[in-house]
Every structure is written in structure tokens, then in C-alpha cells.
Image: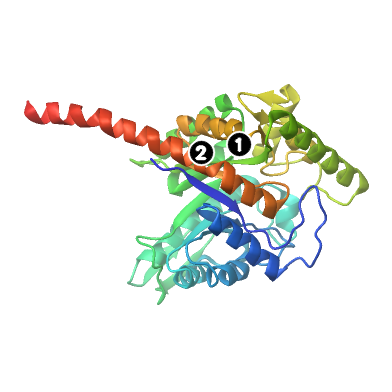
Amino acid sequence: MPVEFLGIAATNDGSETTARSGPSFDKDYTLRLARAHEDHGWDRVLFAYSSASPEPGTAAAYIAARTERLQILLAHRPNVSYPTFAAREFATLDAISDGRLAVHFITGGSDHEQQREGDTLTKDERYARTREYIEIVKRVWTEHEPFDHEGAHYRFRDYVSDVFPIRQPHPDVSFGGSSPAAYAAGGAVADIYALWGEPLAETAQQIAAVKAAALAAGRATPPRIQVAFRPIIAATEELAWEKAHRTVAAIEQRRAAGSWRRRGGDTPQNTGSQRLIGIAEQGERYDRALWTRTAAATGGAGNSNALVGTPETVARALLDYVDLGVDIISARGYDLLGDAVDFGRHVIPLVRAEVARRDAEAARTARPAAVAEAAR
């Protein structure tokens, strides 16, 4: 089964290691970065969300109208709009992109960050709201007759939309989280379940939890699994590790100077970040190439565990995750543009070639068995 690659659609060139050189929404850089992904083998890019960043739906529409193949993953927080409105917004963007849209619904892991935009629900209440929100959005996308809704968080009467997605039956719904409440909600309604990169053993446990939640919700097919990393690659192992240590030094320097800080404060509330910190406290290196110092340096801020090594080493490490059942690899470097090009040139082809070889071998193996079965 082919593996997909997700990059980042940043609206400026800033990162944990480097201050941005222009405005928060630098439309020329945003387009350059998107086209770099499109030109170097990536499948899609994520337009992320925070309470202070440029509005991602508008930025995504700008890129959708200026690219041809690149798919779009739009992050969206349910607290910022009513689900009937959001469903129309998504369907319109899907039309602009000719069916290239998927939506990543963010429940929110920080009370402080949520409250900045007026959201005062508890974490578990937010997960319940997100599940209800997604269920409504899917109905708006697919139902052509008016319907009523009476739920815990939303109530409306006689609603029907006049705009529907091009992608059928609807755009993919992406969801993330590492708590039991997250597994239950995402396992029930998500097409894609997003995890942050952890050691292989812990990732396998999370995949099992997602599948169990999907089964408990009565689903025959569980969500596809996405895992995210920060790749640090170079021509040799020695150069890659030198680059890795320079990266952490830059993060620590900027954080100490107050020029970069973790959103929501230094003590994370969300289970995913707490897991990353806990793993980092237990050790720096895991499996083939996983390195936790970047997660420790950022306080477990989002996607922050690194894969360090040559392109061949990083590709083999990613294939280890594919072997666990991972379908989508999310990767974002610290030099957003340069690393997107390098990863696309040097890592993606290696992973794709090996997955294709395995698929061809599996097909060859299955063919004689199928012939023998038919002859019985």
C-alpha cells in the first residue's frame, strides 16, 4: 500500500531555530514553500492553526488556486465557528482545490490557548464537542434534504447546504490526540488519526488503542494512521549528528533569550506533549534514528521528536513505522524550505521505492496462491 507524505504549509520562514524575516503572512514565501513541496514528491501540506497566526483557510485557498497537484490538510478548531458554516467553508475550499482538501479537527490541548478565543470548556468536554461537530459537518457535506440537530453543544432546525464537496463521499477527516478521550472520539469519526512520533513500541501501543476505539464504535475499518517527525538529515551520520546538536543549541539559545516560547506555557496540559517529555526523560535515542533532545528542548511542543541520520538511515527508520501500519508520514525540518527540498529529493524516493518493491513482491506471492485456490 503506497505511503503518503505530509509537509508543512508555513506562512513565513520562522521556526524554533530561526526568527522569521518578514511578516506573519508572507504570501511569496508561502507560495514558494508550497511549490517546493509540490515539485519534490510530497502529497499534501498542513495549514496549521493557532490563536494568533494567519487564518489558515484563507491561506489554503490562496495556495489551492496556485498549485495543481498538492493536496491540502486544513487545521480547524471547532470553537471558532458553527459547524454548518464550517462545512460550507470546507466544501467551497474543496471546490477551489478541485477535490484536494482534507480537514484536521483540533480539539485543543491547552486551556490557556483555547481561552484566548473564548473557549472555556474542559478538555473532555472539548473532545465530546469535536465529535459532535465532525458528525454534523459530515451530514452537511452529504445530505441533500433539510435535517434537524439536537445535541449537547449544537442545536438547529431545517438545515441544508447548497454547496457540496467535489471529493466523494466527502473530504477526509483527520483527528489527533493521545488520551483515552481522544482515542474514543477519533476512533469513532476520523478517516485519519494523527500521532506525534514516538519510539516504535509506544507507537504500536497507540495504534492498537486507536483500532480498539474504532472497533468499540462499531467501525469495520479503522482510521488510517499518520505519524509526525522532525527529520535532520545530512550526507554522513557524523554530519547529521553535528547538525542535530546545532539545531538543539539554537532552540535552547532562542528559548533562553525569550525569542521563542512554547504556546500555552512551559507546562503542557495535553497528554501528547506529556508523553514526549516523559519519553525524553527516559532516554535520548531510540530504535534506529529517533532522537528526543529536540522534544526536550521545546518542552514537548507539538511535533518535536527528530529522526537523525543520512537519507538512507532516516528512510529505513520510516519504513520501520510503515511496518507497524503507518500510512502517512508527516515531516517538517527546521529550515522549512531547504529541508522540504532535501527530504523530497533524498528520502521520499527511497521510501516509495522500497514500499513499491514490497507491494510488488506481495502481489507475486499472492498470485500463485490465488490460482491454486481457484483450481480447487
Farthest residue to the bottom: give it: 162
Farthest residue to the right: give it: 257
- Mark 2 sits on what residue? 350
Question: As displayed, is residue 281 above or below residue 13?
Answer: above
Asked whether the residues under the numbered discs 1 and 2 touch, taking CB atoms below 8 Å apart as contact, a structural biologist would say: yes
Number of the label disc, if any, that sits on residue 177: none
Q: From where the camera sits, is residue 182 visible? A: yes
Q: Secondary structure at mark 2?
A: helix
**What is the basis of the colouring in this image?**
rainbow
Farthest residue to the left: give it: 376
Q: From where the camera sits, is residue 184 visible? A: no
Question: As displayed, is residue 356 above or below residue 128?
Answer: above
Q: Amino acid at mark 2?
A: Leu
Q: Amino acid at mark 1?
A: Pro
Looking at the image, which residue is at 45% across and 61% down? 136
Q: Secondary structure at mark 1?
A: helix
Local packing at callout 1 (Cα closer than 10 Å; few below 14, some 14-19, many 20+) is many
- Mark 1 sits on what residue? 311
Looking at the image, which residue is at 69% across and 27% down? 279
In what quadrant of the picture does the N terminus appear?
top left
Per the model, the C-alpha gap separating discs 1 and 2 is 8 Å
Residue 87, given in percent of the width and then of the height, sits at 48, 67
Among the two numbered marks 1 and 2 on one chain, the one whose residue lies closer to the N terminus: 1
Residue 157, given in percent of the width and then of the height, sits at 43, 72
In what quadrant of the picture does the C terminus appear?
top left
Looking at the image, which residue is at 85% across and 38% down? 249
Looking at the image, which residue is at 65% across and 30% down? 290
Residue 318, given in percent of the width and then of the height, sits at 54, 34
Q: Nearer the viewer, residue 93 or 18?
A: 18
Q: On the rendered structure, is 149 left or right of 5?
A: left
Residue 46, given in percent of the width and then of the height, sits at 59, 55
Please tell me in which quadrant of the rendered image residue 234 appears: top right
